[in-house]
């Protein structure tokens, strides 16, 4: 009877009501017009494939440095406050990018983008997981609830993509940056209005150093978790980097500017649809099959140089890879104490960034000396590592809802 009462309609309504400011804030946060045409703007002010890779490496390095401090800040201070600080960095970065006329100036904006990414990394996941623990006593519906955040993200990305395409076509590429500022400010306000769960405050270590020690021990203390981490990090690298460089593939295919909007719309839908897809691939076998589908899509991108085939293959790659990452993140959170959940997730994010830097630099090098499609073999190799790790992984012991 107790289990039946945990997911009553009234509880679901209460969760939705509490999460509503976060949904709206997330939608507005991703309603950024310049995402759609950023790579075109970069090429216009003097970037090439190598310097695009350098730009990604710089914000990845910044995020790497800030990942763990931002996660510990979220655990010890405020998770909604960390999101708000991240938005302020996004705002500053957008303004710097808007006034950039050369590579060097734009690279400065990428530093603020990196801080913004770090502030968001692991924070939303920790909020959703802990809210479910606080309200229901378990996080069994994690994929379902997190999917709502991703739907908000996708709606925002679609709106930004459509708006960005129109603004870029009729007003100019630089205007996509200036006109993104109001949504970022409104998003910050909604994040601050959110009433965050407090379960992570229970039993929190008074010593900062002890908190840091507990954070890293929680992630690396079990062999099964390390195997899970390898699979999670490498599948995340695929969708993370592909979502960043996919416009270079479109540019190489001489895609008309007007098609960048629809292409970005399709890619944007991958997040909401991906986390919905996650509900149906929780078993080890289904995850492995899904990974092989992504592998096929990446090979299609490398060999078939057709605009629409490329766009669809990118969409499927992002959708499935993101969905798998949601499933693996749930598995990881099942084995982390609430008091270090955001910090531990940020430590994992730091590992992603650490690997992202050499991968994007190598991608840029191969792309400049060969072509952007042959550089796609890097993602095939990364995905094969994720598949092997998932195949070898044994189920980890679930310790959901522990706060010790």
Image (tube, helix red, strand yellow):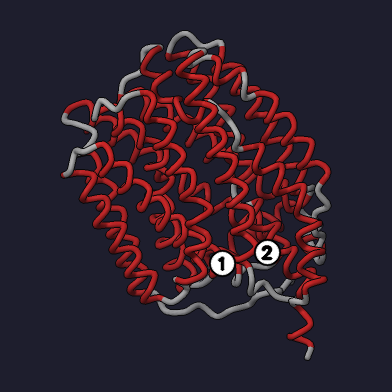
Looking at the image, which residue is at 21% across and 49% down? 300
Q: Position of residue 272 (x, y in %)?
A: 53, 53
* Label 1 residue SS: helix
Residue 213 visible to the viewer: no
Looking at the image, which residue is at 70% across and 25% down? 182
Query: Which residue is under mark 1?
Result: 330
Query: Which residue is under mark 2?
Result: 129
Q: Nearer the viewer, residue 16 or 364?
A: 16
- Density class for disc 1 (Cα within 10 Å; few <14, some 14-19, many ≥20) is many
* Lateral position of residue 372 relative to residue 338, left or right: left
Which quarter of the picture shows residue 367? top left
* Label 2 residue SS: helix
Q: Nearer the viewer, residue 77 or 320?
A: 320
Q: Quadrant of the image for the C terminus?
A: bottom right
Residue 217 visible to the viewer: yes
Marks 1,2: beta carbons within 8 A? yes
């Amino acid at each position: 009877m107790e289990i039946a009462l945990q997911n009553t309609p009234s509880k679901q309504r209460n969760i939705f009501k509490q999460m509503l400011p976060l949904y709206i804030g997330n939608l507005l946060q991703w309603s950024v017009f310049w995402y759609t045409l950023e790579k075109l703007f970069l090429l216009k002010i003097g970037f090439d494939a190598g310097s695009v890779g350098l730009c990604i490496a710089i914000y990845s390095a910044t995020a790497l440095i800030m990942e763990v401090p931002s996660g510990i800040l979220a655990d010890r201070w405020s998770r909604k406050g960390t999101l708000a600080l991240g938005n302020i960095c996004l705002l500053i970065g957008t303004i710097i990018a808007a006034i950039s006329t050369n590579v060097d100036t734009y690279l400065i904006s990428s530093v603020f983008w990196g801080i913004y990414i770090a502030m968001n990394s692991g924070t939303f996941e920790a909020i959703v997981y802990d809210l479910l623990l606080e309200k229901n006593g378990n996080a069994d519906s994690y994929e379902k609830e997190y999917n709502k955040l991703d739907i908000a993200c996708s709606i925002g990305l679609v709106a930004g993509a459509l708006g960005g395409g129109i603004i870029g076509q009729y007003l100019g590429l630089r205007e996509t940056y200036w006109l993104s500022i109001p949504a970022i400010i409104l998003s910050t306000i909604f994040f601050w209005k959110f009433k965050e769960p407090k379960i992570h405050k229970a039993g929190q270590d008074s010593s900062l150093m002890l908190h840091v020690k507990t954070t890293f021990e929680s992630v690396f203390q079990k062999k099964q978790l390390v195997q899970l981490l390898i699979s999670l990090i490498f599948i995340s690298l695929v969708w993370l980097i592909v979502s960043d460089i996919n416009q270079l593939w479109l540019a190489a295919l001489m895609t008309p500017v007007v098609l960048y909007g629809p292409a970005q719309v399709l890619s944007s839908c991958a997040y909401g649809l991906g986390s919905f897809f996650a509900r149906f691939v929780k078993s080890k076998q289904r995850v492995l099959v899904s990974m092989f589908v992504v592998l096929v899509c990446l090979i299609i991108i490398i060999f078939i140089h057709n605009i629409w085939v490329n766009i669809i293959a990118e969409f499927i790659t992002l959708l499935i890879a993101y969905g798998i990452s949601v499933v693996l993140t749930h598995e990881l959170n099942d084995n982390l104490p609430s008091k270090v959940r955001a910090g531990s997730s940020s430590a994992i994010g730091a590992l992603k960034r650490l690997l992202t830097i050499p991968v994007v630099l190598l991608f840029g090098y191969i792309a400049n000396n060969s072509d952007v499609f042959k550089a796609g073999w890097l993602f095939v190799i990364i995905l094969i590592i994720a598949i092997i790790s998932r195949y070898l992984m044994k189920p980890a012991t679930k310790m959901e809802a522990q706060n010790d």
